[in-house]
Image (spheres, coloured by chain):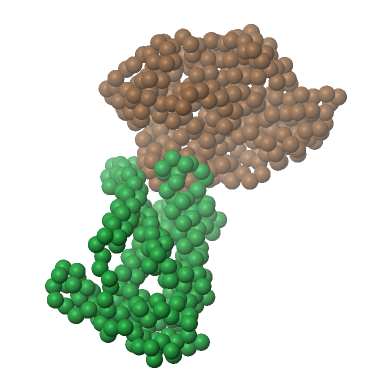
Chain colours: A brown, B green
Amino acid sequence: MAVIRDVMPAFELYQPASIADAQKLLEQHGRDAWVMAGGLDSFDWLKDRIKKPKAVVDLSGVAELKGIRASSDGGIEIGAMTTLTEVVKNPIVKEKYGLLAQGAELAASPQIRNQGTIGGNVSQDARCWYYRAGWPCYRAGGNICYADTPTGRNREHAILGADRCVAVNPSDSAPALIALDAKFVLRTAQGEKVIDAEDYFIGPDIDIMHLNILRPGDLLTAIRIPSTWAGAQFYFEKVRDRNVWDFALLNVASAMKVSGGNIDSIRIAVNGAAARPLRLRAVEAAVQGKAKSAATGEMAGKLAVEGAVPLQFNAYKIPLMRNLVKRAIGGVEEANFA
Amino acid sequence: MIQWATSPWGQTVPIHIAWFLIWVAVIAGLGFFIVHAIWVKFFARQEVFAGGAPSSALSAKLPERVKRHSFAARAFHWIMALAMFALLITAFLPKVGFPFGWVTYHWIAGLVLTASILFHIVHATFFMDPWSIWPDRADIEDAQRRLKRFLGQDAPPPRRFAKYPLENKMYHGVIVLAGLSVVLTGVFMMFRVRTGILPRNPYLFGDLTWGMMYVLHGLAGVGLIALIMVHVYFAVRPEKFDITKSMIFGTMSKEHYLEHHDPERWAVEKS
């Protein structure tokens, strides 16, 4: 984490009470506006004086954005400003969508989960320290990636999908939401848009300066989880350097339907391997109909890391990802770390 | 016009051009179309050349179709054109709001352009008349005559053109400058991305040199937007159709040749 340099730069603070007001403010200020959810990511940027927005739109007063509601299709809708703690403790989430509860519970620390929101968690920026320190890298609009150099410190960086920038997405809830086939509800100048969770995230090949598709004026308002995967077999594992208050080196989330020992259907995603959480479609296709066994897990693990390119200091991520995928499919007791 | 940043060592360095220059180039290209089209439609006078009408004896000696471009020259032109369009699309569409994964396509198109230019240099030097595309003394004298006549002063009419009119030669010169700028800087910029061809080495140059290279690449790139727009505009103008068709079929009509070109300065190959 960069050294906090000073007090925050001056900005106009807006605290709308409704989505409509928030959207109006965002449209009015365009690129000069900063959307603040729980403030965990925002205050890092502001106190480091790396980002200097003219207007900060604080969404904490928008009641419509909070809470977890049952939806008509039997699933649930989670307001973007719902805290991670509320998500973790919600009885429906715990009972039917335990995968999300596990992912959210492993994010950061209890204090941060009390303040951090689900919308903020999926929309947070990359943690690459060169970028966070304000260096003029690709992600900051420059023409170099300081992490992807012969001497760059890149232990936590990408092994897949790198394109000039090698930063990774740090969210723990994102892969769980992708595995649950969640939909993200956006309010844009063109109206409401509902998109698949995996399409919310973008890699540097498409947009090197953003981790998601939100553009000035856009707002993530809710996350809808359909009932499709309610009560399925879930697996979530996060590997980090210390057991609390740390970002994932890699995490994996899977939702699986098994009958007679065979995998009927599965959705699996990893994060920390690329600039966007990766849904492993090739793995899903390869294991469907196969026995839920160590052998299938082994095959899936190998398939998952095909095309991985290690940097100077993160080659360990390849066997780590291979084993996480293997454990997610074959089960923990079956797996051995190679 | 230039985007600046502070390097980790506190140095103020350029990082790339300001992207609004894309729109400046597009507007400049469109402005040229409009002004030129109005000029041709309402103000331009009939072109008059020294020497009067071409003789019928000369006409009788010429084939109906006059060979202008060899197959190799045409192939080079169209390969270069495809590469150039691919480069402009991949470079600038993402910048103006149509994001897609462009880097790989961009450097591959850049390599095609580089290879085609190298071929052209060798082909033009050893298998064509390399001087025919560069302005000569007659071009300068004729340009002076045309300028004087345009300003209403007394001057003899200019001679007919050699193989390439002066405007073509000047355009070629500017394209050479812009093209070599993007190619040379682009080849070095390939050291900054993963290509599998060149080893990545972002420390090949210092931040300032890299920054200037990105700026030059960008300036030449946006310059090419306007240049290509102008080129396409002339290619579709009715009075230039014969020239455009000669870049497709290799030949131009005898009438166009006799009307605009000087047989003394461009002797037709007998087929």
Q: Is residue A108 visible?
A: no
Left or right side of B20 for A60: right
Q: Nearer the viewer, residue A19 or A169?
A: A19
Residue A230 position within the rendered picture, expressed as x and y whole percent measured from the top left = 70, 17
Q: Who's the residue at 35% across and 88% down the image?
A: B55
The image quarter in which residue A27 lies? top left
Q: Pinpoint residue B59: horizontal percent, then vertical percent.
A: 41, 87
**Vertical arrangement, residue A320 with respect to residue A256, above or below:** below
Q: Is residue A266 left or right of residue B246?
A: right
Residue B68 image point, x, y percent:
45, 78
Q: Residue at x 49, y 60 (%)?
A: B83
Judge whether A332 appears above or below A222 on screen.
Answer: below
Query: Picture coordinates of residue A273 (x, y %)?
Result: 58, 36
Number of numbered callouts drawn: 0
The quarter of the displayed image where residue A6 is located: top left
- Residue B213, by quadrant, is bottom left
Left or right, residue A14 beside residue A76: left
- Taking the spot 77% from the left edge, 33% from the top edge, the residue there is A288
Residue at x 41%, y 44% (from the top left corner): B95
- The answer to whether residue B59 is left or right of residue B10 is right
Q: Residue furthest left?
A: B153
Q: Residue furthest right?
A: A260
Comparing A155 with B65, the one in front is: B65
Q: Is residue A309 visible?
A: yes
Q: Nearer the viewer, residue B242 or A260?
A: B242
| Closer-to-camera residue (A46/B174) | B174
